[in-house]
Amino acid sequence: NADALLELEAARQVNVRCTVSCGDQSATTSLTVTLQPVSAIDNALPLLSVAEVVNEDHPWVRGLISEAQGLGITDAAREQAWILDETFRHTGFIAAKNHGVSAETKAALLKASHDFFAEPDDVKNSIAIGKSNCHRGYVGIATETLDDKNTMAGDLKETLDTGIDHGPDHPEVLKGTPLHGLNQLPSTPGFKAAYDRYFAEATDAAERMMRAMAIALDLPLDFFLSLGDTIYNLRLIH
């Protein structure tokens, strides 16, 4: 909720009460969290330019492999890989820019998600996750409980769980490997086109990150991508 976020940022400080339980033992503590504007967070974290890291599968990628140097990795890509390596060693968090997920793509998926979650319950439940053999589909409000002991009712959220489509002839599907199978996507007008575009751009960004890590570790460019099927999950939460 944008208004709530603005109110939180204006508040600057939030009091948080936290209870940690382990078996029959529990402990409660309170703390005050000081909020920083987004601009301050951006300035505090190192920035990684994902666009500099090669992804040969996308012909629109510009200047990522240096043609002048044959198949050599560009200096720009090595510089970004060094930033990633140093940050993961010493900071643990990084902010990505030029990642290729456009503002238009994000806005289209947010609108499509809003339209889906506004559908009647019977329409949403037509693709309920319980009908999937690979944990894909709609999860209704209060049907999940992440803290059984301390939650009287279910979680106040509804979600749509998705991932890479694996057809019936996919080797992992034939072997019965969990979480491999087909999505259950909404029939809401415009949803699939917005979803497919976002998923493709986000997957491309993730693969660039894996290639950057490979460069930083002096491994073959596709080392991590060659380890086997990557399970990319995209969960929409309302």
Image (cartoon, helix red, strand yellow):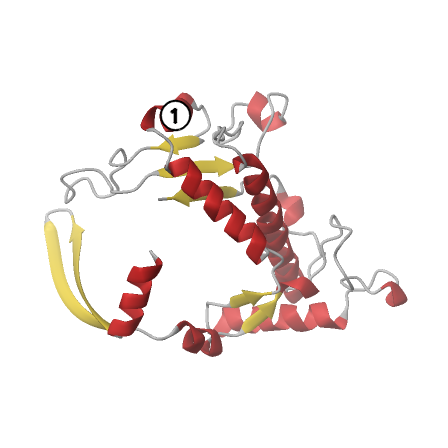
- Left or right: where 77 falls relative to 45: right
- Left or right: where 1 falls relative to 49: left
Residue 34 in sight: no
Q: Position of residue 125 (x, y in %)?
A: 36, 25
The quarter holding residue 170 reads: top right
Q: Which is nearer the eye, 190 or 19?
A: 190
Residue shown at the point (76%, 54%) measured from the top left: 60
Residue 176 lies, with reference to residue 40, above or below; the image says: above
Residue shown at the point (60%, 25%) measured from the top left: 167
Question: Number of marks in the image?
Answer: 1
The quarter holding residue 13 reads: bottom left
Mark 1 neighbour density, 10 Å: few (under 14) some (14–19) many (20 or more): some
Q: Which is nearer the eye, 195 or 119?
A: 119
Residue shown at the point (46%, 67%) measured from the top left: 93
Q: Which is nearer the eye, 117 or 139?
A: 117
Q: Name the residue under label 1.
A: 123
The quadrant in which the C terminus is found is top left
Residue 232 in sight: yes
Q: Position of residue 107 (x, y in %)?
A: 51, 52
The quadrant in which the N terminus is found is bottom left
Q: Position of residue 206 (x, y in %)?
A: 59, 53
Q: Position of residue 108 (x, y in %)?
A: 53, 47
What amino acid does circle 1 point to?
Answer: Val
The quarter holding residue 194 reads: top right
Residue 2 lies, with reference to residue 38, above or below; the image says: above
Residue 135 lies, with reference to residue 131, above or below; the image says: below
Residue shown at the point (67%, 63%) measured from the top left: 51
Residue 71 lies, with reference to residue 89, above or below; the image says: above
- Name the secondary structure under disc 1: helix
